[in-house]
Amino acid sequence: MEQMTITAKIQISVTTDSSRLLDETMAVYSDACNYVSAYVFRTHDLKQSSLNKVLYSTLREKFSLKSQMAQSVFKTVIARYKTILENQKEWIKPSFKKPQYDLVWNRDYSLTQNCFSVNTLNGRVKLPYFSGNMAKYFDHTIYKFGTAKLVNKHGKYFLHIPVTYDMEESNIADICNVVGIDRGINFVAATYDSRHKSSFISGKAIKQKRANYSKLRKELQMRQTPSARRRLKAIGQRENRWMQDVNHQVSKALVESNPKHTLFVLEDLSGICYATERVRTKDRYVSVSWSFYDLEQKLIYKAKQNQSTVIKVDPRYTSQCCPVCGHIERVNRDKRIHLFTCKNCGYKSNDDRIGAMNLYRMGINYLEDSQVPDAVTTE
């Protein structure tokens, strides 16, 4: 068994009074986080016990925080610093600009099938919420709620709840289907599977929309005004949300179109950000900046939920190797017209499909190397 954590999102229904109370509580919580963050930046002290000894009284008196809220502030700041140190390897002071509130399950908040109860500066308040698909998560013999985050987005209040549960680990011996997935620009994903079927997810509309974003961004950068800079920031956030939504849809489609116990084979594109020197400057935004890593991560966790597996393999020659005779030559592929023509045996096909076919074959080899007999029927 392995643990799986997903984030459930619900929208809270508020009145004018409860909205004002939540706003006040979140604003004070963020101010308290900034206060503690400044102290940690000066002292490099990340021990909750010593922070509690020095700052607890101040948080209670200056910010009027409840006892549990003060402890939550310490945990939030410590977690943020640890993340920064792990990723950046240096002390950088985080800023808590947006109103937020981290809530510990059964202390700061509780949730039933029709009521959200939350601790505020003026005591507990109970609010209704839009339940959506939350009903199944209330079986606490299976699902465990973690520390949630209350946020305000455009005047609407949302609770993001991490939900953890145990699920059976996917077993190589159970693999019944292999899918090679070639990721690219013209086709976000081209696939080839154990039924010898190919599918394509077009990137034409995505490419056009990103070109529009790029054009608008250049126009705003030329203006160099405060309003243009604010607009640039908003556009960047909007484009990022849109890219994540596209990757959600693509990964969901890939998982749902294949049975349980599927082996998905991807190219290891971890070095793609360092390949910019091989791409013309004017083409770098289109060729390099798409969030392949985000798509990969979404596919991994969705595949786990479907008891499937994702592996990454060496991407070398996947677009130059003939899947029929094995001949490898750079000129086999004509990137201009997206056509693969083997110079040895003459086999022709779409170049993205060729990549998917070679990834499929590498998946078959992976199973054979794992000594799983008769797991998948090969060609």
Image (cartoon, rainbow, N blue to C red):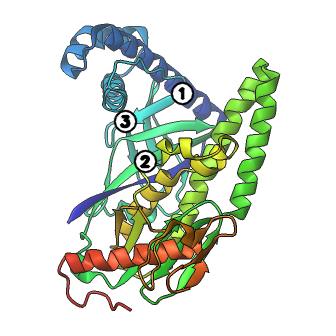
- Is residue 261 among what the camera can see? no
Q: Which is in the foreground here, disc 3 or disc 1?
A: 1
Q: Give the residue pinned by disc 2.
A: 271
Report, in whole angstroms, how far the alpha carbon at label 2 lies from the one at label 3.
43 Å
Please, what is the three-letter code of the amino acid marked with disc 1? Pro
| Label 2 Cα neighbours within 10 Å, binned few <14 / some 14-19 / many ≥20 | few
Residue 36 in the image: x percent, y percent?
37, 15
Which of pointers 2 and 3 indicates the residue nearer the eye? 2
10 left or right of 5 in image: right
Q: What residue does disc 1 label?
A: 99
Q: For this view, does 323 lie left or right of residue 352?
A: left
Which residue lies at the image location 79% right of the left edge and 30% below the top edge?
A: 220
Check the image and report above or below for 268 versus 303: above
Circle 2 sits in a helix, a strand or a loop, which is it? loop
Residue beneath label 3, please? 108
The residue shown at (51%, 54%) is 292
Amino acid type at mark 3 = Asp
Q: Nearer the viewer, mark 1 or mark 2?
A: 2
- The amino acid sitting under disc 2 is Gly
User: Is residue 175 left or right of 97 when viewed as pictured?
Assistant: left
Is 131 located above or below residue 340 in the figure? above
Bin the neighbour count of mark 1 within 10 Å (Cα to Cα): few under 14, some 14-19, many 20 and up: some
Looking at marks 1 and 2 on the same chain, the residue that comes earlier in the sequence is marked by 1
Do callouts 1 and 2 mark residues in contact (Cβ within 8 Å)?
no
Tags 3 and 1 in contact by the CB under 8 Å rule?
no
Quadrant position of the C terminus in the picture = bottom left
